[in-house]
Amino acid sequence: MSGPLHTPVCDLLGCRHPILQAGMGGVARSELAAAVSAAGGFGCLGMVRERPEMIRREIDAVRARTDRPFGVNLIPAATDKSLFEEELAACLEARVQALVFFWDVDDEAIARAGAGGARVLYQVGSVADACAAEAAGADAVIAQGLEAGGHVRGTVSSLVLLPQVARAVDLPVIASGGFASGAGLAAALALGAQGIHCGTAFLATEESFAHDIHKRRVVEAGSGDTVHTDAYAINWPPNAPVRVLRNGETDALGHRLFGHHPDRIEKVEIAEEEGRPIYLWSTDSPLRAMTGDLDRLAHFAGQSAGLVECVEPAAAVVGRMVREASEAIAGLPRDTGLRR
């Protein structure tokens, strides 16, 4: 398949469209990953700190729904070393097509995944980390701008970061942070990316494992309704900012949005998931399987929430992005470079 939306990253990952679904921990289960891949995008399981038995079940569940390629998201820096080793082994034994890593660039993880036959995509927030991932053997980098939801590694916007990363590395670059539309995809391609990486847009889909409370809040939110803070710190290393939708808890922080250390936060249980306690100020977001005071949890979302207007099937999101991007590129002057 050729055309303005077919890029080398499509060949690298085996997908029809250069639209990657973010591996949102807890939210991105088999139903969502399979739906995105079946629609021609690239789905991803969010398996951060999950037991290898669950990872195997979820991989099998995706394959029962589609024969299209997909990936698995793991985060070495946020996972106990022994558990990460078990997670990685489970993925390689199952021969997943790609592994998506995030946060500190882990040379050993990249080497092991590559040696095991998986493509390696590394999500980074700076030019320096993109270069480090390339030097360690990654197959592609995901450049994440400050607009992104969930954990945010970078400190500048996608518009500024993306072209710098694209110039600095010879790998395919995928844009992340603020991308939830076909026009955004066209813009990312113009800035040097070979595709986009979307979380917020796919969180608010029918197949997402996010709780309906979370989905509804994303739909209702505007781009100015997010907060960048490190207050949601329990479960992660120190100094790990996130972007969430504002709520009563973040409003109460006032100007004290940063300086929160996970080891100094009192664990107050406000919800539970099948017997597992969920604490206020943890990095747990509301999931279908949770009960309790879910409004007080981290409602991860990027500034692209302002572009999300309804909860709909993941295939509809992919289809609309492809259609809008094709129309946007077709409407450009012929000397832009995107017109082929």
Image: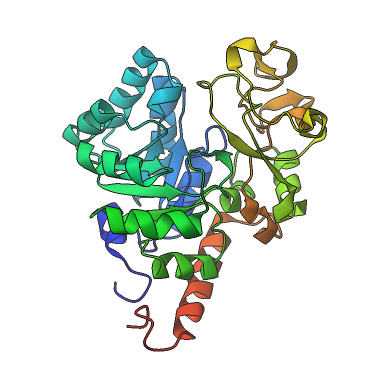
Residue 129, percent from left and from top: 34, 40
Indicate the colouring scheme: rainbow
With 246 as the anchor, is 265 left or right in this view? left
Q: Residue at x 28, y 40 (%)?
A: 133
Image quadrant holding the C terminus, namely bottom left
Relative to 237, is 301 above or below? below
Which residue occupies 40% across, 42% down? 124
In the drawing, does residue 231 fall left or right of residue 296? left
Q: Residue furthest left?
A: 115
Residue 51 visible to an observer of this rendering: yes
Indicate the quadrant where residue 248 lies: top right
Q: Residue at x 59, y 35 (%)?
A: 242
Residue occupying image coordinates x 53% and y 74%: 324
Asked whether residue 41 is in view, the answer is no
Percent x, y for residue 93? 25, 28
Residue 175 coordinates in the image, percent (x, y) = 43, 55
Q: Camera-side residue: 147 or 60?
A: 147
Q: Position of residue 106 (x, y in %)?
A: 30, 29
Q: As rendered, which of 284 and 42 lies closer to the eye?
A: 284
Q: Is residue 9 left or right of residue 149?
A: left
**Nearer to me, 148 or 322:** 148
Quadrant for residue 85, please give it: top left
Quarter of the figure with the N terminus: bottom left
Is 36 drawn above or below residue 330 in the view shown?
above
Task: Determine whether, in the image, residue 336 is placed left or right of residue 138.
Answer: right
Exactly how many numbered labels are in the figure?
0
In the rendered image, the vertical position of residue 201 relative to residue 231, given as above or below: below
Say which quarter of the image contains residue 276. Answer: top right
